[in-house]
Image (tube, helix red, strand yellow):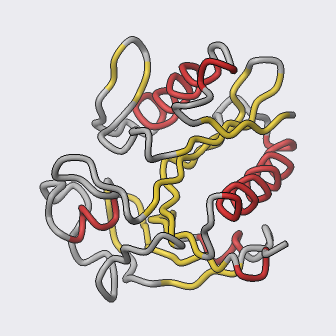
Amino acid sequence: MQTTTLSFSNLHNHGELFANLFRARRQSFIVQKNWDLPEEEGMEFDQYDTPQSRWVAIHDLGRIMAGFRLTPTTARCGIYSYMIRDAQQGILGGTIPSGLLNELAPQDPQVWECTRVFVSHSIPQQYRRSVHGRMVEAMTSTARELGATRLIALTAGNWARWYGRCGLDAQAIGPMLTIDGGQFQCVSINLAAKLH
């Protein structure tokens, strides 16, 4: 199992990995979860897939096992900034409720947003814990390398049950929400303990 952090400046070094990550995102979010998201050529993407973001792929022999995207809370591209802030400001048209945070969304170079987190549906249950462990390790180390001391995420409502098991220091920063029939909540992940 390998971990690769992708950016627009290093895509050319990794062959099909970037495209395969977007194909795996399509499988996870459009096919499996039936979310209404943009897609093209078998790949899922959105307005936050810009050179400001980084994508982390957990892969083995060219097969994507898991992945996620990190975007700085200082990002700007046209009318968009980052997903949680744009939802709070009503820019996303209500697909995510604007009351998702207890306070104003941060715009801080040390705070990054983590989105499009997934584990491939093809990963057998007995291997999922090790894949989750690799994801947490990659998320914290990549975020720290990018200068983050904190991550924010809109995550599944059962986060408290498994974040602790994964060694994440997190707290709720918004109410529990029902989105597309599932329970979700915004959380803040403290990376200060992960400083090296």
Q: Position of residue 33 (x, y in %)?
A: 44, 40
Q: Position of residue 128 (x, y in %)?
A: 79, 46
* Residue 115 vs residue 78, the one in the foreground: 78
7 displayed left or right of 43: right
Residue 127 higher or lower than 133, as above or below: above
Residue 10 higher or lower than 159, as above or below: above
Q: In the picture, which quadrant includes the N terminus? A: top right
116 displayed left or right of 166: left
Q: In the picture, which quadrant includes the C terminus? A: bottom right
* Residue 9 vs residue 100, the one in the foreground: 9
Q: Position of residue 64 (x, y in %)?
A: 69, 27
Residue at 70% from the left image edge and 55% from the top image edge: 142
Specify the farthest residue to the front.
9
163 displayed left or right of 45: right
Residue at 24% from the left image edge and 78% from the top image edge: 99
45 displayed left or right of 166: left
Residue 144 higher or lower than 12, as above or below: below
Quarter of the image where one finds residue 193: bottom right
Specify the farthest residue to the bottom.
103
Quarter of the image where one finds residue 11: top right
Residue at 55% from the left image edge and 44% from the top image edge: 54
Quarter of the image where one finds residue 67: top right
| Total numbered labels placed on residues in the image | 0
Q: Position of residue 132 (x, y in %)?
A: 76, 52
Residue at 32% from the left image edge and 60% from the top image edge: 179
